[in-house]
Amino acid sequence: MKVVEIKFGKPEPADFDAKSFVADSAAPAVVLYDYGATRFRLNGSSFQLESDRVTRIKILKKSGYNVATVEVPLYHRDRSEEKLVGLRGFTYNEVGGKVEKVKLEIAKAFTEERTKNIRVRKFTLPNVREGAIIEYAYTVTSDFLFNFQDWSFQREIPTRWSEFQAVIPEYFDYKMLMQGYEPLVLQTREDSQMQYNLHTEASLDPSAAGGRVASDNELIVAKGTSYHWAMQNVPALRDEPYMTTMRDYVARINFELAGERMPGQGYHNVAGNWEKINMDLLNSDEFGGQLGHVGFLEAALKPLVAQYPDPAARAAAVRELVLKSVKYDGTNGYSASGPLKRSYDLHRGTAADVNLLLIAALRQAGLAVEPVILSTRGHGRVNQNFPLLEQFNYVVGLLPLADNQELLLDATEPLLPCGVLPTRCLNQTGRLVTKDVAGRWVNLAPAQRHSHYQDIKLTLDEQGNLTGKVHEEHGGYSGAAAREKLQQLGRKNT
């Protein structure tokens, strides 16, 4: 298979011809070329990841202008951060038979804080029109070896060529998971030799201020493996009804650091495990530490305990109390944003604030409820082979009942009955977090169905008019949707 190559800054004349892009008439744009490469380098005595990207895209319609805005996620923790360097880009338009070239203004790029550990570097290619070609290139440097850049071969728009290379020294063991339904046109693996320059410094007189420092450089030769993958003419993957996130289906390759084997040392397993995740959550101030601090609800819970001896009925009553006390603000998460008392006093909180308060209140009411972490449908499916806390973004409660029955509890949606999770949570499995055992997987498949029944009786008269009655019943998730529609119309739900 011949590898596709481009010269950055010099688009092909044929790429300006719209007739070259007729395979997908609905496509607003097409990726002409997408190239990535990740390698290791020594920064002093520590390894770093260096990831390059070069992308060229053809804009076909005005609806494709959005692809000219690019987001690059950068991880940061403590005082270390990933950095984007070497950013450059151009927009090309054919004007009067000549190619007009406009350079990306790097100064207009900006940074947006997305989560606690992720900030996004954003930039927009200038002067974008129908028929324009945009291209950009950059490098991301990272001290976080566990955050090896994944690679997606597929997007919401067609891709003519997507290629990724990785060179991994013998010191690091990465698990690689390929997903998707598109075939690779190139897949190679070769053993190779790599050289790294180890730079060390040592003080000759540590006790003296401003003492002399000796430095040393050593050339290290290591075995390694070079990987090369490519896909060609990859169709667009578009959002469809009832899909989870497209990340669950897109053709991509994921990497996870499993272990390290440094010179003169044995193999060190650095991959997490579900037992450790379980204990970390229980010991976290934002998770397990919140579940015993709801004494402020004791007076309100006491009459409910006396009134509802049945566990399911008591759970429903406690849930109703939480629903009336704290409103879900639309933000998902599994860790509380602050003390639960604060959310209770503000009458507003994240999904974690609401549901951790629910779990703590249920425990205060004498019910043995445990938290279950899960990933919402928009966040993606959980891969049970990868013990990563980053896969989760939500928490609900689980109450064991008689006859091995279990009740899943959430207090973010007032229109849903007790024991019915919001549709965003219906994403296969969740993980039970408990101190008694190492945790287990919980089936999130709903007991309730989406039930919509119609009984229509009509009479056709001689003039062709129809008269009669329509009887409708909504049950399960359809009932919740009907109640929401009635609420929007300003009508009272019954």
Image (cartoon, rainbow, N blue to C red):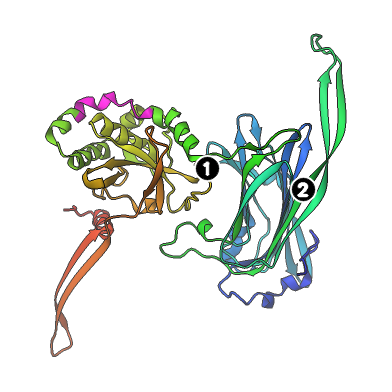
Q: Pick whichever, 197 or 245, lies toward us.
A: 197
Q: Which residue is mark 2?
A: 224
Work out whether mark 2 precedes mark 1 in sequence or the reverse, and give the earlier one.
Answer: 2
The answer to whether one can see residue 331 in this image is no
Gap in angstroms between the C-alphas marked 2 and 1: 26 Å
Q: From the viewer's perspective, is 304 left or right of 293?
A: left
Q: Pick whichever, 103 or 456, lies toward us.
A: 456
Give the residue type that dot 2 points to.
Gly
Q: Secondary structure at mark 1?
A: loop
Q: Pick whichever, 9 or 155, lies toward us.
A: 155
Relative vertical location of residue 324 with respect to residue 183 in this rendering, above or below: above
Q: Residue at x 48, y 63 (%)?
A: 239
Give the residue type that dot 1 points to.
Leu
Q: From the viewer's perspective, is 187 left or right of 390?
A: right
Relative vertical location of residue 20 with respect to residue 180 in this rendering, above or below: below
Q: Which residue is mark 1?
A: 388
Q: What residue span does the magenta drawing correspond to? A: 290-301
The answer to whether one can see residue 210 in this image is yes
User: Which image quarter is the N terminus in?
Assistant: bottom right
- Main SS of the magenta segment? helix
Name which quarter of the figure residue 284 lies in.
Answer: top left
For the residues labelled 2 and 1, say whether their Cβ atoms are less than 8 Å apart: no
Q: How many marks?
A: 2
Q: Residues within 10 Å of mark 2 (few under 14, many from 20)?
A: some
Q: Residues within 10 Å of mark 1 (few under 14, many from 20)?
A: some
| Residue 25 percent across, percent down from the top left | 58, 75
Relative vertical location of residue 149 with respect to residue 308 in this rendering, above or below: below
Q: Residue at x 65, y 74 (%)?
A: 21
